[in-house]
Image (cartoon, grey):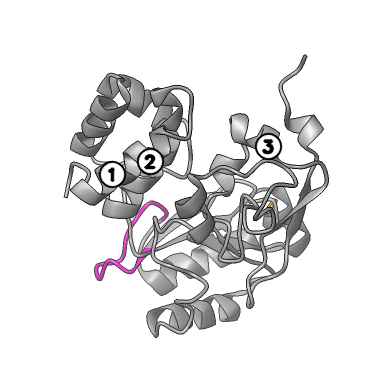
Amino acid sequence: MARLTPDNVVRAHELIALYPEKRSALIPILHVLQEQDGYLSEDGMVHVGEIVGLEAVEVKGTASFYDMFHFEPVGKYLVAVCTNIACMLQGAYRLLEHAEEALGVAPGGTTADGMFTLEDAECLALCGNAPCLTVNWRFFGDVDPEGFDGLVEDLRAGRLEAEVPPHGTLSRVGRRQGLRALPPGGPGRDEAALVGEDGAGDGGSAANGSAAAHVAPGSAIDLSTRRSTAATAVVDAAHLESPK
Ligand code: FES
């Protein structure tokens, strides 16, 4: 798969309609492309550029700024082990080495069955539950080697499919709202939280751009999953707005 499917072209135009300028929909449409193929192919980015009126180099130049986009195929589950300071002090390198041995790949590698890609990540903002990792951007804290083995076993067996969807899958909120929030206090306010009950998949998009300015001061963004450590971020919209 390379170019967007006809259905996804329709989704792209629906996203464009949410913004005053076509190119403002670039990041949301790239998420759709990544959901379709699991990564951003060169042809796919050319197609997105045609749709939003940008050169392919501008599309890739923008996409490559964001950690959540991938430019080559990755596994069904993207396992990112934090090795930053808090996690390092709590045994992150022991955990990462264990993950390498358990999966049989080095960071950046994908298992032969295409199930897991392992990454060595910078701070994932769950320092209070170090060492931690994310699987497709869903948080798991206080992970020791035994816990890692249990997590991999559960993922392989499909026991966590409800809370850890395949890599690239957009949250229901992201799909409905084009990765943006409704105006504060408007209808569906609860459903329109930037990150919904089905995970943190759109957190990266939520944390930047004009969408952040639409988050009501003090809005709670629930990043919890049933199994992982609950992590709730409170966003101060005034703080996120551009400097006057
Ligand atoms: S140092 Fe690991 S989450 Fe912050």
* Identity, as a three-letter code, of the amino acid under mark 3: His
Q: Is residue 113 magenta?
A: yes
Nearest to the eye among marks 3 and 2: give it.
Answer: 2
Label 1 crowd bin: few (<14), some (14–19), many (20+), radius 10 Å: few
| Majority secondary structure in the magenta region | loop
* Residue identifier under label 1: 10
Q: Are marks 2 and 1 in contact (CB under 8 Å)?
A: yes
Query: Is 189 displayed left or right of 174 in the figure?
Result: right
Q: Does residue 204 appear to the left or right of 44 in the view shown?
A: right
- Judge whether residue 64 can be spotted in this image: no
- Name the element at disc 1: helix
Q: Tell me the residue that label 2 is attached to.
A: 14
Q: Residue at x 47, y 83 (%)?
A: 154
Q: Which residues are magenta?
A: 107-116
How far apart, in angstroms, are the residues tagged by discs 3 and 2?
19 Å
Residue picked out by circle 3? 214
Q: Is residue 93 above or below residue 124?
A: below
